[in-house]
Image: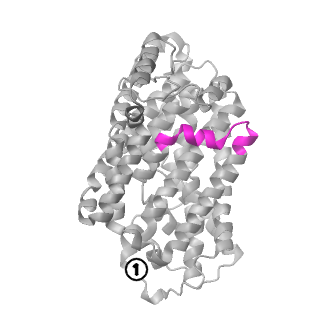
């Protein structure tokens, strides 16, 4: 069965949309763009949190509700995309090859991210001279997170957690990797049974359009969600929370910037593409991630845009969801950067053996911690446990600025997965190169529409 994809079609309705857009005043056309609306929402939210902190804190439910709405759709999006892609494929070996190459790529790049964070802390040394006394640390502030470290209790537990308790349990608990496993099994069987599964494949293809249509409606609430989350962050913590920890935050942002523009930029360049053009194409998702401090909020839009870029549905369905679990580059940088900062701030000299041990453990504890704000903090506690000389209470030093670091953490995670999807698609022949060139050059625009179809308009 031919693969069904939701892509732009040069039909009359699309041309009518473009003509209508061109007749509107420039300022109205700009205000109609999602990323402009999200940016305005973030600015207004930050001003509200700064000028009226109490009101800003009360706006937290706006951000939380938006993220919950998106999370509500993620399992269905992943299931429909993977089953539709693999179920309509005549070559199951290519799906297996894509999955294997993706896992290899994720481990290599995540290791580079860990090392990048470690190197940056050694160069800038943000914790040196901090003068923190372990006896005066607030251990109670970390206790609530320490109770959750059991979720990161080793590689065996992580691997067994891939298998859900039941078929429906994968969707009920919202575990992405469990949904991926169920989806791959369903897609593989549909591809094998041929015409017998045609009615079910057709139903799932129709369901894909429905799911993306609902998601695109939810995306219209992104400005309110991003604004509410930003108002809460500024109102709750304020810029004064940075204080002496500004060097840590700056070091983390610098490490993330170097990783994105140098490491990922080089990978994109070797593949014949530009990281800057990809970031410009994903501006909506970047701002939504920044505002919500969660890369999960941008997952549906990212998958839709990857298909629009010219990548096959099977490829997008396999690489992006699994990348959200295995390819958490921002979380990896956060763990190596923050762990070494705590050691420096407490005056504890870690040997190279201890640092390598922490990196090895972080390769496991960072998995699955990328999508949710604060999850990286829990994973870091599990990582510090490998070095007995580092007290868990040391995490109290960074608790006040974790929210500011969470935003950059989510951004790097999302960018890393976008680059992985594009680069692997380019290397494995799952990408329409001509279409990708036109889209990244701005010749074929993208717009969210309530019905789930993608409108193409160079002026958008």
Residue 90 drawn at (x, y percent): 61, 18
Colour mapping used in the image: one colour
In which quadrant is the N terminus drawn? top right
Q: Main secondary structure of the magenta part?
A: helix
270 inside magenta stretch? yes
Residue 422 drawn at (x, y percent): 63, 36
Location of residue 167 with respect to 84 vertically, above or below: below
Quadrant of residue 401 within the rendered picture: bottom left
Q: Residue at x 34, y 36 (%)?
A: 220
Residue 237 drawn at (x, y percent): 36, 68
Magenta span: 267-285
From where the camera sits, is residue 448 visible? Answer: yes
Which residue carries the number 1 mark?
139
Q: Which residue occupies the foreground of this view, 342 or 97?
A: 342
Q: Residue at x 71, y 45 (%)?
A: 267
Location of residue 388 with respect to 320 vertically, above or below: below
Is residue 185 shown left or right of residue 111?
Answer: left
Q: How many marks?
A: 1
Location of residue 99 with respect to 199 vertically, above or below: below
334 inside magenta stretch? no
Q: Say what secondary structure mark 1 lies in.
A: loop
Is residue 459 shown left or right of residue 124?
Answer: left
Location of residue 19 with respect to 136 vertically, above or below: above
Quadrant of residue 103 within the rendered picture: top right
Is residue 293 shown left or right of residue 10?
Answer: left
From where the camera sits, is residue 164 visible? Answer: no
């Amino acid at each position: 069965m031919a693969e069904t994809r939701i892509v732009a079609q040069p039909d009359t309705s699309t041309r009518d949309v473009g003509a209508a857009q061109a007749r509107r005043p420039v300022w109205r056309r700009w205000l109609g763009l999602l990323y402009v609306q999200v940016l305005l929402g973030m600015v207004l939210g930050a001003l509200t949190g700064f000028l009226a902190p109490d009101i800003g804190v009360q706006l937290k439910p706006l951000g939380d509700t938006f993220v919950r709405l998106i999370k509500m759709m993620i399992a269905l999006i992943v299931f429909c995309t993977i089953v539709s892609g693999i179920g309509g494929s005549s070559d199951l070996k290519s799906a297996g090859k894509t999955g294997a190459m993706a896992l290899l790529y994720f481990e290599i790049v995540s290791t580079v991210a860990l090392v990048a964070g470690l190197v940056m802390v050694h160069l800038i040394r943000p914790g040196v001279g901090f003068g923190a006394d372990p006896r005066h640390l607030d251990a109670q502030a970390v206790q609530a997170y320490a109770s959750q470290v059991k979720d990161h209790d080793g590689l065996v537990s992580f691997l067994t957690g891939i298998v859900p308790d039941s078929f429906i349990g994968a969707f009920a608990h919202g575990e992405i990797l469990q949904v991926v496993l169920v989806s791959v099994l369903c897609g593989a069987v549909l591809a094998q049974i041929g015409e017998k599964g045609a009615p079910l494949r057709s139903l799932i293809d129709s369901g894909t359009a429905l799911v993306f249509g609902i998601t695109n409606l939810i995306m219209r609430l992104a400005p309110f969600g991003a604004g509410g989350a930003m108002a809460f962050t500024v109102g709750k913590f304020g810029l004064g929370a940075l204080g002496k920890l500004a060097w840590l935050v700056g070091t983390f942002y610098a490490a993330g910037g170097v990783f994105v523009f140098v490491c990922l930029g080089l990978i994109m360049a070797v593949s014949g593409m530009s990281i800057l053009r990809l970031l410009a194409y994903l501006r909506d998702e970047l701002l939504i991630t920044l505002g919500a401090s969660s890369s999960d909020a941008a997952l549906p839009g990212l998958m839709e845009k990857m298909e629009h870029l010219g990548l096959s549905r099977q490829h997008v369905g396999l690489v992006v969801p699994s990348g959200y679990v295995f390819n958490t580059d921002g979380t990896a940088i956060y763990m190596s950067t923050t762990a070494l900062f705590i050691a420096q701030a407490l005056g504890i000299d870690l040997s190279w053996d201890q640092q390598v041990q922490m990196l090895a453990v972080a390769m496991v504890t960072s998995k699955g911690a990328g999508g949710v704000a604060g999850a990286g903090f829990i994973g870091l506690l599990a990582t510090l446990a490998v070095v007995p000389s580092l007290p868990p209470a040391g995490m109290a030093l960074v608790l006040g600025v974790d929210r500011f670091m969470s935003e950059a953490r989510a951004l790097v995670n999302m960018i890393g997965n976008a680059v992985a999807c594009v680069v692997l698609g380019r290397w494995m022949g799952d990408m329409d190169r001509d279409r990708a060139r036109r889209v990244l050059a701005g010749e074929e625009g993208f717009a969210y529409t309530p019905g789930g179809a993608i409108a193409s308009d160079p002026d958008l």
